[in-house]
């Protein structure tokens, strides 16, 4: 019963993560107009750490085991801290399409690092699904690219963000073997927040003049795409491989297109829609499993003919 429940909850947790991370791109567009990259990352991490800390106290979970701290510290620095700052900075240098295209190298790097460092298997279905999803991400990225061009600095920053994201995921996976998803996320978020403290002055100064909508979007980023989504991600990651979870995030570009359409009125073109369909199809292939061939039931031995008592007659 528990294994069946886990099989249902893990994909559900991954789906929550993907939807909330997709919504983050819409909120970052609003908050990023009023906050600089470092200040936005720090405000987001502080909001997330506050919510996660309350959840940790309510659930009565203490400090993670000593064996988990190395992975928590590395993922906190590279993923919660470095990734968020560098990605915010990169998106100020390049258009959204180019940023999404470069960052989507992350799942490929996760698969390569996972196979090398964690011994993750690379089944043909996973590789095929990643290839289809990556083609879809390229299509979405090129179709959403603006006319302003892309700076070399912006592309390099987005590439560094993808490397930090991939390395953070691979570092987090072993920590989940001894620490809970909530512990790993809470203290990873705290590590990232401490790493971003040099931007505290910028955050205070910019918050004084920022519109309320931008500040609310920053808080939303901390509560939902960070506190909730990173926890559901860790829960699902603890129950599958890093490579398979990385491939799941290829659904994000398709959902970003849909949310931008609904929330911002940005109507996607046919090419963008086609790329989104490819992203979702690739995720479906990578998450699928080959059908197990059921062996035929063993033949039951024939019953020996019953001995009739002497003198018994055959029925008429």
Image (tube, helix red, strand yellow):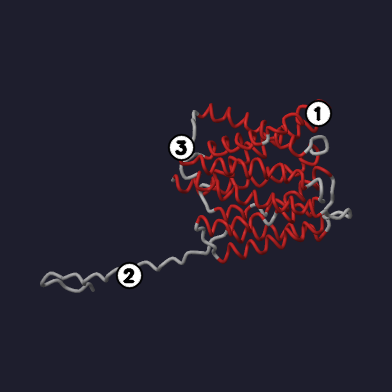
Earlier sequence position, callout 1 versus callout 3: 3
On the image, the x and y values in percent for residue 48 come to 65, 33
Disc 2 element: loop
Q: CA distance from mark 3 to mark 2?
A: 52 Å
Which residue position is annotated with label 1? Answer: 212
> Looking at the image, which residue is at 34% across and 68% down?
298
Viewer-nearest of labels 3 and 2? 3
Q: Circle 2: is it few (<14), some (14-19), or many (20+) Cα within 10 Å?
A: few
Earlier sequence position, callout 2 versus callout 1: 1
Q: CA distance from mark 1 to mark 3?
A: 40 Å
The mark found on residue 299 in the picture is 2
Tell me if residue 313 comes above or below residue 213 in the rendering: below
On the image, the x and y values in percent for residue 274 come to 76, 60
Disc 1 element: helix
Q: Quadrant of the C terminus?
A: bottom left
Earlier sequence position, callout 3 versus callout 2: 3
Which residue position is annotated with label 3? Answer: 65
Q: Which residue lies most toward the right here?
A: 147
Disc 3 element: loop
On the image, the x and y values in percent for residue 265 come to 85, 45
């Amino acid at each position: 019963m528990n294994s069946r429940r886990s099989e249902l909850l893990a994909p559900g947790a991954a789906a929550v993560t993907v939807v909330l991370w997709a919504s983050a791109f819409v909120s970052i567009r609003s908050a990023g107009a009023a906050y600089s990259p470092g200040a936005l990352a720090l405000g987001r991490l502080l909001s997330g750490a506050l919510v996660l800390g309350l959840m940790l106290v309510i659930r009565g979970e203490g400090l993670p085991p000593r064996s988990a701290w190395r992975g928590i510290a590395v993922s906190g620095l590279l993923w919660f801290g470095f990734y968020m700052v560098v990605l915010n900075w990169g998106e100020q240098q390049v258009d959204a399409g180019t940023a999404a295209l470069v960052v989507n190298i992350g799942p490929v790097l996760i698969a390569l690092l996972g196979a090398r460092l964690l011994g993750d298997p690379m089944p043909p279905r996973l590789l095929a699904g990643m290839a289809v999803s990556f083609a879809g991400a390229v299509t979405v990225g090129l179709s959403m690219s603006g006319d302003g061009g892309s700076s070399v600095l912006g592309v390099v920053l987005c590439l560094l963000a993808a490397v930090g994201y991939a390395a953070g995921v691979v570092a987090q996976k072993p920590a989940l073997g001894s620490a809970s998803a909530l512990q790993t996320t809470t203290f990873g978020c705290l590590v990232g927040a401490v790493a971003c403290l040099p931007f505290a002055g910028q955050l205070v100064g910019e918050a004084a003049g920022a519109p309320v909508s931008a500040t609310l979007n920053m808080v939303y980023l901390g509560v939902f795409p960070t506190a909730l989504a990173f926890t559901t991600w860790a829960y699902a990651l603890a129950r599958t491989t890093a490579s398979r979870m990385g491939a799941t995030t290829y659904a994000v570009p398709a959902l970003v297109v849909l949310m931008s359409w609904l929330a911002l009125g940005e109507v996607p073109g046919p090419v963008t829609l086609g790329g989104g369909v490819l992203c979702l199809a690739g995720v479906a292939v990578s998450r699928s499993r080959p059908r197990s061939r059921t062996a035929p039931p063993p033949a039951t031995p024939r019953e020996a003919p019953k001995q009739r008592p002497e003198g018994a007659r055959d029925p008429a």
